[in-house]
C-alpha cells in the first residue's frame, strides 16, 4: 500500500480562487512594478476549477496561460466523482491530464464525494456514507484519477448538512483513504466549521486526528445561514467574507499542521479584486504569524 | 448497507424529490429535509450554467420565466459530463418543442411558465437559443496554428505559390447556421444594444444564413448572402480542405458578380481560413 508524505506546494503562501471578473485586474497586477509574484504576494497563487477549462481553445485558455506565466496554479476538480461511477472517469481524466500537462499546476485536488450516477452528473458535491464499502469505492476512484493523470492528488473533506449512517468518523475515513491510495488531504476549514455546526462534531478534535504529514492544502471561505432554518443549518455558499470563527479555526489548523498553502474561495457575490486580495493578505498574515510563532519557539 | 444502494437512493431523491429510500441511510430522521440543500445545489448549478450559456434567451424570457423553463430542461436532460461547460446543446430544440406545446398546456402550467410579453410575441425563441449556443461554441473552439493571414498570403505569393491551388478549409471557430427571418437582428439587438451595424448585416440575408467566427479572441456574427454561403459550405469539412479556386467557383456559380477579391481579403482579415501548406 502506498505511503507518502505530502509536500507538494509547500512553497506556496496564501492564494485566491481565480474568477473571470478579475482576470484583467490580475494581469494588470502582474504587469505593475510591484505586482509580480515576488513582491505583492510574496507567493500569491491562484486556484481554478479544472472542469471550467474543458474547452478546445479560445480566450478562457489564453487568459489562463497569461496568468500561469506570472503565478503558480492549483487545479481543483469538482466533477471527478471519486466515490462513484468510475467507468465514466477515463474520459474526464483525459481532459484533466491534458490541462495538467500544459499548465503544470503546483497542486491538484478533488473532493471525497460523489456527483455522478447512472450516466448523469449532479453538479454538486454529495457526501459518501462513511462505510468500508464506500471507502473502497473512494480509494478505487482516487487510484483511477491518480494513475490517469500520473501524479498524486489531494482530496477535500465535504460540507455535511446531516449525518448519514457510518462505520467510522470522517477523519478516520479520509486518513484511511489517503494511507491506502497515496493521496494527500485538502482540509477545507469552512466545510469543517459548517459540518461541526450542522452535525455537532468537535472541529478541533477532528483536526487533531489528521496526521500533519498528509495535509497539503487548506481552504477557507464564507458561509451563510439557511434561508429557512437560520443558524441551525449553515450553507457552504462561498458568497460571503470568511467568518471570524473560520479564521480562528484556521489558526488552530496551522498550529497543528504547520505552514500549508491557504486558499481563499469566493464563488458568488464576487467583490472587487482589491477586496478579495485584502482577504487573501489576511490569510497570508496568519501564515506569517505562524512562522513567527515557530521562530520564537525555536529561539 | 451498500454504497451502491445509497447512491441509487440519493440519485432517486435528486431526480424526483422522493426521499423515502434515504431514510435507511440517515442517522436522524428529522434531518432528512436537509437533503434539499444538495438537490437545490444541483438545480441551481445547472440553471445558472444554462443562464450563462443562453444569455440573450434569458434576457428575452425574463429571469424568472427562464429559470422555470430551464429547470424543466434539467429534469428532462440532466448533464451527462462532469462539467457544465457547454451544457445545453439540446436546449434550442427543447425550446422549440416547448413553445409549440405552450398553447396546449394546462392552465396551471401556463401560469407557472408564463412568458413575458416580449417573449410571447417572439416567434424566434429557439432561433435565439441556437444563436446563443453558436456564439458559445465559436468562443470555445480550438485555436489554429495554420491560419491564413494577409501577411503569410503575401509571403506565399512572393514564394511563387498559386493560392488558387492551395488547399484551405474553414477555421474551427467558423459556424454556419440558418435561422428564421429577423432572428439575427433580434439576437444582436438584445446581445449588443445600439449595434446598428449588426442589424444592417442581418437584413442583407433573405435566406437567414448566419456565420459566427472568432478573431483575436472575440466572436463575430454576420449574415451571409447566398453566394457567400456557397463559398463557406465549399470550404467546410474535415480532411485537407478544398482548393481555394474551386471554392470561389462555387460562389460564382450562385452569383456571377461575386466580388472574389473583396471577399478573399475579408476572409484573410477575419482569419476565417486554415491552410495546410503553412
Image (cartoon, coloured by chain):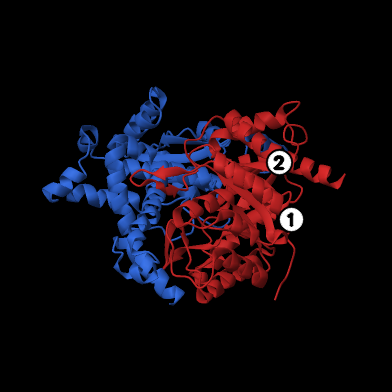
Chain colours: A red, B blue
Which mark, by number, is residue A8? 1
Q: Secondary structure at mark 1?
A: loop
In this view, B240 is above or below B251: below
Quadrant of the rendering where the N terminus of chain A is positioned: bottom right
Q: Tell which tag, 1 or 2, sits nearer the viewer.
A: 1
In this view, B99 is above or below A35: below
Which mark, by number, is residue A106? none
The answer to whether the residue labelled 1 contacts the one labelled 2, judged by CB atoms less than 8 Å apart, is: no
Residue A126 visible to the viewer: yes
Q: Quadrant of residue A228?
A: top left
Tell me what residue is drawn at x 11 percent, y 47 percent.
Answer: B107
Q: Residue B261 or B26: which is nearer the viewer?
A: B26
* Residue A12: image location, x then y, percent: 73, 46
Q: On the rendered structure, is A256 left or right of A96?
A: right
Chain letter of mark 1 equals A
Label 2 packing within 10 angstroms: few (<14), some (14-19), many (20+):
many
Q: Secondary structure at mark 2?
A: loop
* Residue B218: image location, x then y, percent: 53, 35
Q: CA distance from mark 1 to mark 2?
A: 16 Å
Chain letter of mark 2 equals A
Q: Residue A219 or B82: which is nearer the viewer?
A: A219
Label 1 packing within 10 angstroms: few (<14), some (14-19), many (20+):
some
Q: On the rendered structure, is B112 left or right of A42?
A: left
Quadrant of the rendering where the C terminus of chain A is positioned: top right
Tell me what residue is drawn at x 65 percent, y 61 percent.
Answer: A210
* Residue A273: image location, x then y, percent: 58, 31
Q: Earlier in the sequence, mark 1 or mark 2?
A: 1
* Residue A295: image location, x then y, percent: 83, 43
Q: Residue B66 or A265: which is nearer the viewer?
A: A265
Tell me what residue is drawn at x 28 percent, y 46 percent.
Answer: B68
Which mark, by number, is residue A71? 2
Q: Residue B162 or B201: which is nearer the viewer?
A: B201
Amino acid at each position: 500500500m502506498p505511503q507518502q508524505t505530502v509536500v507538494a506546494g509547500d512553497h506556496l503562501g496564501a492564494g485566491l480562487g481565480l474568477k473571470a471578473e478579475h482576470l484583467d485586474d490580475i494581469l494588470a497586477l502582474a504587469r505593475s512594478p510591484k505586482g509580480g509574484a515576488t513582491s505583492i504576494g510574496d507567493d500569491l497563487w491562484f486556484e481554478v476549477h479544472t472542469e471550467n477549462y474543458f474547452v478546445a481553445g479560445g480566450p478562457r485558455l489564453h487568459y489562463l496561460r497569461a496568468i500561469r506565466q506570472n503565478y503558480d496554479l492549483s487545479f481543483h476538480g469538482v466533477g471527478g466523482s471519486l466515490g462513484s461511477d468510475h467507468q465514466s472517469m477515463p474520459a474526464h481524466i483525459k481532459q484533466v491530464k491534458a490541462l495538467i500537462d500544459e499548465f503544470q499546476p503546483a497542486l491538484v485536488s478533488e473532493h471525497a464525494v460523489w456527483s455522478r450516477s447512472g450516466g448523469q452528473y449532479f453538479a454538486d458535491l454529495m457526501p459518501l456514507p462513511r462505510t468500508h464499502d464506500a471507502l473502497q469505492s473512494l480509494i478505487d476512484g482516487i487510484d483511477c484519477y491518480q494513475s490517469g493523470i500520473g501524479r498524486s492528488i489531494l482530496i477535500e473533506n465535504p460540507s455535511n448538512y446531516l449525518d448519514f449512517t457510518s462505520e467510522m468518523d470522517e477523519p478516520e475515513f479520509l486518513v484511511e483513504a489517503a494511507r491506502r491510495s497515496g493521496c494527500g488531504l485538502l482540509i477545507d476549514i469552512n466545510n469543517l466549521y459548517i459540518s461541526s455546526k450542522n452535525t455537532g462534531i468537535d472541529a478541533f478534535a477532528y483536526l487533531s486526528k489528521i496526521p500533519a504529514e498528509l495535509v497539503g492544502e487548506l481552504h477557507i471561505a464564507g458561509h451563510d445561514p439557511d434561508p429557512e432554518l437560520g443558524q441551525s443549518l449553515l450553507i457552504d455558499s462561498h458568497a460571503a467574507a470568511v467568518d471570524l470563527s473560520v479564521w480562528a479555526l484556521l489558526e488552530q489548523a496551522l498550529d497543528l499542521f504547520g505552514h500549508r498553502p491557504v486558499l481563499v474561495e469566493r464563488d458568488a457575490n464576487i467583490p472587487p479584486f482589491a477586496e478579495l486580495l485584502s482577504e487573501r493578505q489576511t490569510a497570508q498574515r496568519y501564515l506569517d504569524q505562524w512562522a513567527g510563532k515557530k521562530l520564537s519557539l525555536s529561539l | 448497507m451498500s454504497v451502491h444502494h445509497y447512491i441509487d437512493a440519493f440519485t432517486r431523491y435528486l431526480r424526483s424529490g422522493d426521499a423515502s429510500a434515504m431514510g435507511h441511510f440517515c442517522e436522524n430522521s428529522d434531518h432528512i429535509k436537509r437533503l434539499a440543500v444538495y438537490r437545490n445545489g444541483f438545480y441551481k448549478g445547472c440553471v445558472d450554467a444554462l443562464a450563462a450559456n443562453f444569455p440573450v434567451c434569458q434576457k428575452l424570457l425574463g429571469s424568472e420565466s427562464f429559470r422555470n423553463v430551464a429547470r424543466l430542461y434539467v429534469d428532462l436532460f440532466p448533464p451527462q459530463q462532469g462539467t457544465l461547460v457547454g451544457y445545453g446543446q439540446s436546449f434550442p430544440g427543447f425550446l422549440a418543442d416547448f413553445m409549440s406545446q405552450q398553447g396546449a398546456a394546462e392552465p396551471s402550467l401556463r401560469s407557472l411558465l408564463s412568458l413575458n410579453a416580449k417573449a410571447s410575441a417572439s416567434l424566434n425563441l429557439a432561433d435565439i437559443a441556437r444563436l446563443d449556443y453558436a456564439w458559445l461554441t465559436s468562443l470555445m473552439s480550438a485555436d489554429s496554428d495554420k491560419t491564413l493571414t494577409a501577411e503569410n498570403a503575401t509571403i506565399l505569393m512572393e514564394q511563387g505559390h498559386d493560392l488558387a491551388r492551395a488547399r484551405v478549409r474553414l477555421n474551427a471557430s467558423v459556424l454556419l447556421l440558418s435561422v428564421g427571418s429577423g432572428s439575427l437582428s433580434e439576437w444582436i439587438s438584445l446581445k449588443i444594444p445600439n449595434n446598428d451595424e449588426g442589424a444592417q448585416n442581418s437584413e442583407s440575408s433573405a435566406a437567414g444564413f448566419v456565420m459566427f467566427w472568432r478573431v483575436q479572441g472575440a466572436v463575430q456574427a454576420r449574415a451571409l448572402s447566398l453566394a457567400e454561403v456557397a463559398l463557406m459550405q465549399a470550404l467546410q469539412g474535415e480532411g485537407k480542405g478544398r482548393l481555394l479556386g474551386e471554392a470561389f467557383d462555387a460562389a460564382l456559380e450562385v452569383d456571377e458578380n461575386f466580388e472574389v477579391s473583396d471577399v478573399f481579403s475579408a476572409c484573410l482579415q477575419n482569419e476565417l481560413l486554415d491552410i495546410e501548406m503553412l
